[in-house]
Image (tube, rainbow, N blue to C red):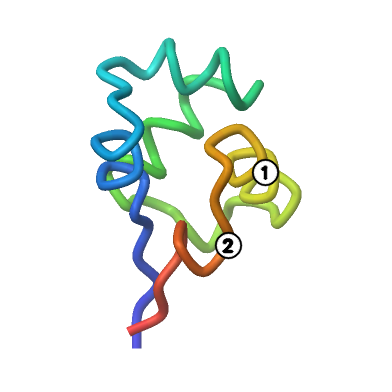
Amino acid sequence: MTLKCNLRKLMYEHELKTFAEVIRLTGVNRNTITHLYHGHRLDKVQLGTYIKVCDGLQCSLDELLVYE
């Protein structure tokens, strides 16, 4: 079972074309957004960071993260 992040899909759905737009909405730093987008080091990201992303993109945690 692995953890997957749907940031790429959510960016598409919200018509966000750049990381800068995501950073502006969420307040999360560029390195973390890059890791989420590419699905790297997801286990190292703090829960509070995921919540900031969800708040900024107006989505739920289960829309952002999938455990398969």
Residue under the image location 46 percent in, 57 percent down: 64
Sequence order check: which comes first, mark 1 or mark 2?
1
Q: Looking at the picture, how far across and down is residue 12, in whole percent?
A: 24, 35
**Amino acid under label 2?**
Leu
Secondary structure category for the residue under label 1 = helix
**Amino acid under label 1?**
Thr
Rendered position, 20 above or below 38: above
Q: Looking at the picture, how far across and down is residue 37, in whole percent?
A: 32, 40
Rendered position, 28 above or below 58: above
Total residue callouts = 2
Q: Nearer the viewer, mark 1 or mark 2?
A: 2
In which quadrant is the C terminus drawn? bottom left
Few, some or many C-alpha atoms within 10 Å of disc 1 (few <14, some 14-19, many ≥20)? some
Secondary structure category for the residue under label 2 = helix
Q: Quadrant of residue 33?
A: top left
Please state if 67 lies on the left or on the right of 8 as rendered: right
Q: Quadrant of residue 24?
A: top right
Please state if 32 lies on the left or on the right of 46 as rendered: left
Residue under the image location 70 percent in, 57 percent down: 47
Q: Looking at the picture, how far across and down is residue 66, in whole percent?
A: 40, 72
Residue under the image location 32 percent in, 34 percent down: 11
Q: Which residue is mark 2?
A: 61
- Disc 1 vs disc 2: Cβ atoms closer than 8 Å? no
Please state if 12 lies on the left or on the right of 19 as rendered: left
Q: Which residue is mark 1?
A: 49
Q: Looking at the picture, how far across and down is residue 31, in whole percent?
A: 47, 26
